[in-house]
Amino acid sequence: MSTAPDRWAWSPLGQMLVNDKILSTEQLNQALERQRKTRERLGQILIDMKLIDEDILLKYLGAQFRKDPITRQDLAALDPDVVKLVSEEVARQYGVIAAERSGRRLIVATADPLNVMAMDDLRRATGLEVDFRIGPASAIQEAIEKTYRKVTQVVTSEGLDDALKVDLGLNIGPVTSVAEGVVDIKQLQTQADDPPVVRVVNYLLGRAALDGASDIHVEPHDDRTRVRYRIDGLLFDLLEIPRQLHLAVVSRIKIISRLDIAERRLPQDGSFSSRIHGQEFDFRVSTLPTLYGEKVVLRLLEKAAVVERYSIENLGFEPEQLELFLKGVRRPWGMVLITGPTGSGKSTTLHTALKFIKSPRKNIVTVE
């Protein structure tokens, strides 16, 4: 147990830091004002503002909750058998990682020890009593990436992930960027259909589908192309592609989306469908010109999974919320608004609600 003075126990974090003259009242007020706007955790805001460091935050949060924090060193030496008690999906959703087990008690590292929903879900998922301990958010995320899989892979001409097994230098000549002038369209079509480029694009689609991503972002930079995908509302690095491959990869995506590969100065929208791992997916594609070339965003939508996998009862509603929601969707008139950020489950909720009210006696029309 922590040996911190009782004067710290359960005092507000900001007040503790002001009392110990680590923050001024003015600095605390600035951080609190930012918190009101962003709804971020105060500790993370103070770190972002460079008013405190991670070690100070851990010290004070540990004292506040009267529990010794889990350090970065602890998180670098976790027992893999303990970590696997919590699924990757739950670990990523709540930003937690299992650190230690003692009998029926599981110690879990978290940067948000007041997340009651996370604790309840962990108890249900593991069947164990869960004890939250404060840990550095960045180190927890690093431990998640290290433990469950290596998310970031760098594509080079010397080699690629085992899923590709290709030499990216093969048949790929220099490609001119948007800023560098006109590109030979016939040459671009040839490059876009080249097996290495096709395999890179197929890999992006397959990996995103396998990992349950909601969208893929292909983002050009001055020296490379960064590919990220969104899981549970958060973006994670997937690949880094050499700069000279960017135009060929984007052109490949445009071709299968039935977009104009010659048009690189105006936004375009398209779509395509594909069967991946035995599951049908729809992809909505958007392109946007940027300083270093076109950015591409692909939105993944499972066709059958929503109807097959979910029912209205297992969407995660609390009983009272579910009752109100069902009351709304059963009405023959009115409007139900479902809002939320990308990947939060809007489409899933809508499709499941339609499945719930579907009846031979009703005529349902959707406008998308």
Image (tube, rainbow, N blue to C red):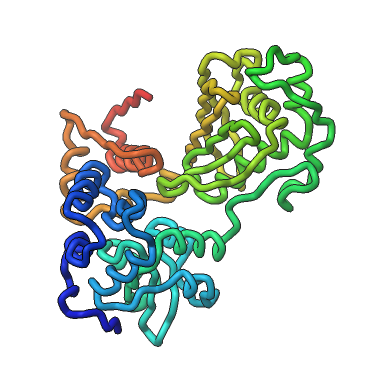
| Residue 57, image quadrant | bottom left
| Residue 184, image quadrant | top right
User: Which is nearer the eye, 311 or 235?
Assistant: 235
User: Which is nearer the eye, 320 or 205?
Assistant: 205
In the rendered image, the quadrant that contains the N terminus is bottom left
User: Which is nearer the eye, 26 or 267?
Assistant: 26
Asked whether residue 116 is in view, the answer is: no
* Vertical position of residue 365 compared to residue 115: above or below: above
* Vertical position of residue 31 compared to residue 342: above or below: below
Residue 223 position in % (x across, y down): 65, 34
Please name the residue shown 40% across and 56% down the image: 93
User: Which is nearer the eye, 365 or 188?
Assistant: 188
Residue 111 position in % (x across, y down): 35, 63
Please name the residue shown 29% across and 73% down the image: 62
Could you tell whether 347 is left or right of 80 in the image?
left
Asked whether residue 336 is in view, the answer is: yes
Residue 357 position in % (x across, y down): 27, 39
